[in-house]
Structure formats: C-alpha cells, structure tokens
Amino acid sequence: MKDFFALLRRFLPPYKKYLVLNVIFNILSAFLTLFSFALIIPILEMLFKVNEVHYAYMSLADGSFKDVLVNNFYYYVQSAIQSMGASATLALLAGALIVMTALKTGTSYLASYYIIPLRSGVVRDIRNMVYDKITRLPIGFFTNERKGDVMARMTGDVAEIESSVMASIDMMFKNPVMIVVCLAMMVAVSWQLTLFVLVLLPIAGYFMGKVGKRLKRTSFEAQTQWGVLMSNIEETLGGLRIIKAFTAEDKVRRRFGRENEEFYRLANRVQRRQQLAHPMSEFLGTVAIAIVLWFGGSLILGGYSSLTAAAFIYYMIIFYSIINPAKDLSKAAYAIQKGLASMQRIDVILNAENPIKDPHPDKAKSLVGVSSPSIRFENVSFSYGDNEVLHDITLDIPAGATVALVGQSGSGKSTLADLVPRFRDVDSGRITIDGIDIRDMRIHDLRSLMGNVNQEAILFNDTIRYNIAFGVDNASDDDIEKAARIANATGFIEQTEQGYQTNIGDRGCRLSGGQRQRLSIARAILKNPAILILDEATSALDSESEHLVQQALDRLMADRTTLVIAHRLSTIRNADLICVLHEGRIVERGSHEDLISLNGYYKRLVDMQNMN
C-alpha cells in the first residue's frame, strides 16, 4: 500500500479538514456500534435468567474503571427489572438500541458526507493537472505518443482512479478505525483469545495481498490496451474519408477486432481476479470465525478462561464485526491496485520532462513595444532522434522583411519555422530576435510576438467569433469583423444562420477548406503580431479567394517581419528573400529574379510549376 499512501500525500493536503472530519465521525460510529452490541449481554444474562447474580452499586474507589462501568450497568438494568418488570426493561433496552443505532447511522452518514468532496476534489485536481501538463509539454512529446492513448489516460485512467482509488478512500479510513476499536474491545474482553486472533488475521492478509499484486500488473496491461483501442478509434474517425475511398472498411474492422479481442482477454483476467476478492475474503473470514469459535469454546469448556457464555457470544459478535470491514478492506485493496495501475499511466504524462523551459525570472529578457523585430539563425542544427534534419543553418531576417522558405517536402522548412516560437529547441547554435537569444525570453512573451497560419487550418468546436478571437482577450465585435473583412471571410460568415455566433463543428467540419483557412487568417490578423509565420497560408483557397486573401496578407505583412513557407511559388514572388532548402541545408538564397538566373534548385521548382 506504499504507492497508495504516496498518492494520498500528493493530492490530499488541500482536503485535510474533510479527512479529519471523516475520521472523527468514523471513530464515533465505531464506538456507537460497540455500545449497541453491548446491550445484548444483559438481554441474554438477565432477562432470560442466564445470570442470577445480584449487583450492588460501586464507586471508582471500589475497582477498575472497566469493572465499575460493567457492574453499574448491570446494577441499573437489574434495578429496572425489579421496578418496571422484565418486559418494560426489554422495551427500554430496545429503545436505547434504536437511539444508539440512529446515532451510529447518523455519524456513519456524516463520515461519508465529508469524504465525498475529498474524493471528487482529488479526481478534479488530477484531471486539471493532466490537462495543464498536456498544454505545457512540447509538441515533440506528442510525436512519440498516440493521441488516442493520451486521451485514454485523461479519460479512462482518470475515471478508473475515481471508481477504484477514490471510491475506496472511505473504506480505507473507515474500516481500519472499526477494526482497531473492535480489537481494543476484544482485548478488554479476553486478551488471550485476541492474541490468537491476531495470529490468524495476518495470514489471511498475506494471501489476499499476493492476488492484489498480480491484479495491479494485469490492470496496467489492460489500461495500456485500452489506450491502443482509443488510438484506433481516433485514427478511424480522423481518416474515415480515406478508409471509405480505398474501400478499406474490412481491413480496419479486422485490425480493431484484433485489438478489441486482446482488451477483452485482459479485461476478463482483471475482472475475474477482482471478483475473487469477495469469495476469498468470505471464505477466509468463515475459517477464522470457525477457528476462533473452536479455540474460545475450548478455553471456556476447559476452564482456562473466565469468560461467561454471554461475554463469549458478545466477543464473537465483535469479532464478526471485524470480518465485514476486513472484507471491505480487501475489496478496497484490490480496487486500489487496479487504480494505481492507472495512476502509473497518468504519471507518464505528469512526470514527463519538458526540455523547453523558461529562463530564471531574474535573467529573463523581453522585447517591449517592438513592431517588427529582426530574426537571426546562427549555425542552427536540429535532429529528430538520430535523424538530423537541419544542418548548420545561418540566416538573417531583417526587421520588417519577408523571407520565404521553399524546397521539396521533407527539406526542413516547417521544422525551421517551428524553432522560432520554440515549439522545439535547437540542438546547437542559437536563434535571436533583435539580438536576444529566444531561450533567454519567457515562452509566453516570445510567442506573444507571433501569429501563425498553418497549412492545416486548426479550428475549435465553437463559434466563428470564438475562433477569430482565440488569441486575443476581450476583443471587440468591431475588431473581429474588421479582421474577418481583411481575410475575405465576411461573405460566407454573413450567409450562416447565426453569423459570428454560428458553431462551426468539430475542427470546423461545417465549413469548406477555404472558409476554414480564411478564419485562421482572420485569427492571425486580429492578434496583430510583430512576427508572422505563414505555413502554406493560402494553399486551401481557390484561385479567386487566394488572390483576395494574398492581397490582405500583403497588407498585413507590410512593415512586419514575416517568415513564409510556400509550395506555391507564385505566392512568394515578391518576398525580400527566398531561401531554398534541400536536405536540411540552405542551398540557394536571393530574390526571385536572382534565383531564376542561377538556374539551380529554385529554377527547377519553378519549371515544375510552370511559373514564368
């Protein structure tokens, strides 16, 4: 259970008051349970004539606290029988039992009442922490992880913690209290018999623990396979058009069927072992009761114990009261093992190292009031693992200049652009903005200088207004409409049912490709950044829209530092500098006319696109 308590130390501190209240009411409930059971002894011994001893009132000076308490309780019960009769005394004891039970159930409810905010709060905090970490991790982390598996960790694994670990917290704090209180009472009734019981319980716990460890291992495998299933579903939904176009439905169904069958097999193993908890604990509990019944009865019958028959029955009732909490404790232990397996998977995200860090606050530098800074790449190299994709790049982008990156797919254009906002960090060399190394700036300050328009328009399942204003807090309606007008988006926006309040669906699925791209351009326009990064910004537009949007982008890029990645060479003819990348190196640079005259890589690209 070391991992369980480590989990509690991580997440419980904000909820200590709820835990304290839960423990207090659990203790009260346990004591009230014992005292309600204690009423059985006088019923057996006195009302049914099992005990004919006459009791006299005792003071604390006459004996120990326990002896005085028991004697005086019998004295008052005996007095009640003599004055009111056996039937009325029985009714009085029954009424006392009702009151005690009401108090016991009330305190038990209050214990559960105060544990609920703790359980829900911890799960909420874990979910927030995972989401927060996902937004902070670099893009490179997710190139090595399946998106579906990350989603499974945020949903299925967190839900597993909620249904197993957090649901078991009440039992983990309630049942030990009940067991300790009952054991204390058992020691008070008969320490010899209790010593024997304490030998039995660890033996039963050992067998349950062995099964629990195996359950945790299998649960981890099952949750990992669940992540594989989620990845498969995510890929299927994202690639449904291709699946249908290539009539590959049977192929993906077979693939999903194999993965689902593996999850079915692992889930069966987990569930079977989990279901073993109850019958195993019940069997071991019954064995323990039978052994204690035999051992205790032998002591009494042999004259080795001063226990009366009624006291022995009371002792067995208390011992039986331990069995149910022990069963629940074993179930909780099984459930916790399953939940801890999910926590291990979540910790892969929470403990992931983020290599892209802010500088020390005292050393952080910033650019204030800069409208178009210069950018310089100095001997920059970058690798994906062992594959070096950028080799010793040196490039100056003057303030307010437009620099275009062209080249074949895989030449390193997008990677080079990703280094500027520190989506990834250079392996060697450095990148400076107005002479400041970007690693000496806070990431938030650095990215606040930039606006991005990507080849794939990345939009969110919300309104048109929300998507345009995504990068700007408290944007006015006038500013949003102005940005949309510059991006040539007002025409189709006004034709929608609710205008700027129209929901565009998942990833903008209710819009055409050109419309989605124009919204992403409007989003960049509204941010009014000092540096623009355009990654094939007009690639999804038809010829007419491309012309209009290119005019808007030309106006936006005026007096602004711009880095453009282009496959359509017609869109960067007027760039101040065009750099041709080939296999991670800048092999040519210059204006359109200069590069044409070189009759090299750029000229071949132009000829392939039939551009004169």
Image: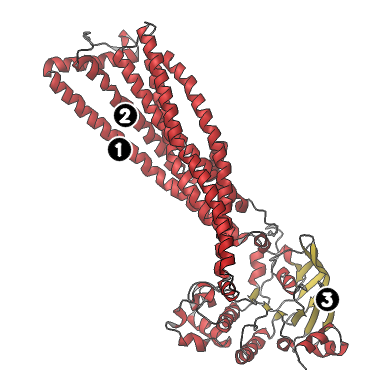
- Decide if residue 24 is on the left or right side of residue 392: left
Please give the name of the residue rendered at 34% of the width and 40% of the height, measured from the top-left corner.
Answer: 110
Residue 138 position in % (x across, y down): 66, 62
Name the residue beneath numbered marker 2.
Answer: 32
Q: Is residue 412 above or below residue 607?
A: above
Where's the N terminus, which quadrant?
top right
**Quadrant hosting residue 197:** top left
Query: Tag 3: residue type?
Result: Ile
Residue 302 position in % (x across, y down): 37, 6
Q: What coloring was used for the rendering? A: secondary structure
Name the residue beneath numbered marker 3.
Answer: 586
**Quadrant hosting residue 17:** top left
Q: Nearer the viewer, residue 273 or 307?
A: 273
- Decide if residue 478 is on the left or right side of residue 33: right
Where's the C terminus, which quadrant?
bottom right
Q: Is residue 159 above or below residue 272?
A: below
Please give the name of the residue rendered at 13% of the width and 21% of the height, measured from the top-left corner.
Answer: 87
**Quadrant hosting residue 100:** top left
| Spatial CA span between label 3 and label 2 | 82 Å
